[in-house]
Image (cartoon, rainbow, N blue to C red):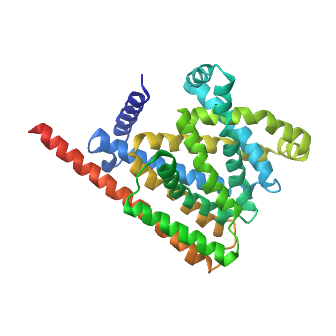
Amino acid sequence: MSTSMFSTVFANTLATTVARLPLPAMWTKGSVQQRTLMMGVALAILSNVLFGVLYAYSSFLAPLSGTQVFIWRMLAMWAALIGYLLISGRLGFHMDKLKALGSVKQWAWLLLPTPIFLSQFWLFMWAPVNGQGVQTAMGYFLFPLMMVVFGCVLFGEKLSRLQWLAVAFAAVGVGSEIVRTQSVSWATLWVCGTYPIYYILRRLQGIGAVTGLLIDLTIFAPFALAYLFFIAPSSLILVSGSGFFIIMLAGLGVLSVLAMKTNVDASQMLPMNVYGMMSYLEPALLFILAITVLGNPFESAMIYSYGLIWLGIVCLITHGVCQLRRAQKESKINKTTEAI
């Protein structure tokens, strides 16, 4: 069964199941496509909320450092992911993909993005408790803009006027922040500068999100264990002797896999424009949590430069809405033509 056919069958099955549940009328009326769209939006919102919860998770695990929480999260994610794939019967599917790799060159190409993935997950857990929460959230705001730039440069994609305007606003915003502070946060640059490379490499490799996650976590697991035994044994003693930490870290792994799974499902059920617009919820939540819950500093002078970046995001969202409306109009015209 092809990937597109599997996604269609999955979406139809899920939508049909939802229709049988005692939900409000707005969730059960309409076509299968409409119910699938609503379910996709619900999953996208859930995944972004879960990522927000994970962003603040480190603050609840003191005295563990951000790096130690990252190590435990990777191990908990790996265990939770393996458990999920075993229960769902999908582990063999992903293993078959890896067995198809026959040469050292193929494996080297496959492992190339892994350090980027690990560094991003480390920063995600380290930044909130080390005063870099706002700067990291801004990196996630800039991420979709950088994806637009990478697509233009690497794949020759043409930008619309709104996309060019979005890039211009972001460039001026970043430039003004550099002038104001005489620097720009390395956390912001690392997120928006390297995360697009990870996604582009995985796209070129044809590796799905779950398979890529399984590879990255499995490779890192031995190093994580070595870190706990030889570099931070006090962390191992603290966690193993506390029921609270064991439960919290188990929850960290389950929430991490659930956030990734709902995000992947949403990407399969929603049109790309809608999915792209929904993804802006995450950096907005991270930004709010960094200032309110985590108490990271936010200077009033930052409003101007960050405001310009947010204007760029508004331009991208507007572009996505216009594309979605255009696609809907074309679909209606095609249906009318076929009926005639």
Q: Quadrant of residue 314?
A: bottom left
Spot occupied by residue 245 in the image (x, y as percentages of width and height): 78, 47
Q: Is residue 251 visible?
A: no
Residue at the image position 28 percent from the left and 49 percent from the top: 327
- Relative placement, left or right, of 292 versus 226 is left
Q: Is residue 165 above or below residue 68?
A: below
Image quadrant holding the N terminus, namely top left
Identity of the residue drawn at 81% across and 53% down: 64
Q: Position of residue 204 (x, y in %)?
A: 54, 36
Residue closest to the eye, 152 or 308: 152
Instruction: Please determine whether, in this image, residue 281 is positioned above or below residue 334.
Output: below
Looking at the image, which residue is at 56% across and 56% down?
143
> How far across and how far down the image is residue 227, in percent?
85, 41
Residue at image position (63%, 26%) is 106
340 to the left or right of 143: left
In the rendered image, which quarter is residue 130 located in? Answer: bottom right
Answer yes or no: is residue 281 visible.
yes
Position of residue 265 in the picture relative to residue 238 (left or right)? left
Q: Nearer the viewer, residue 2 or 33?
A: 2
- Write down the quadrant of residue 188 in the picture: bottom right
Looking at the figure, which quarter contains the C terminus? top left
Can you give x and y, in whole percent of width and height, for residue 102 in the image?
A: 64, 19
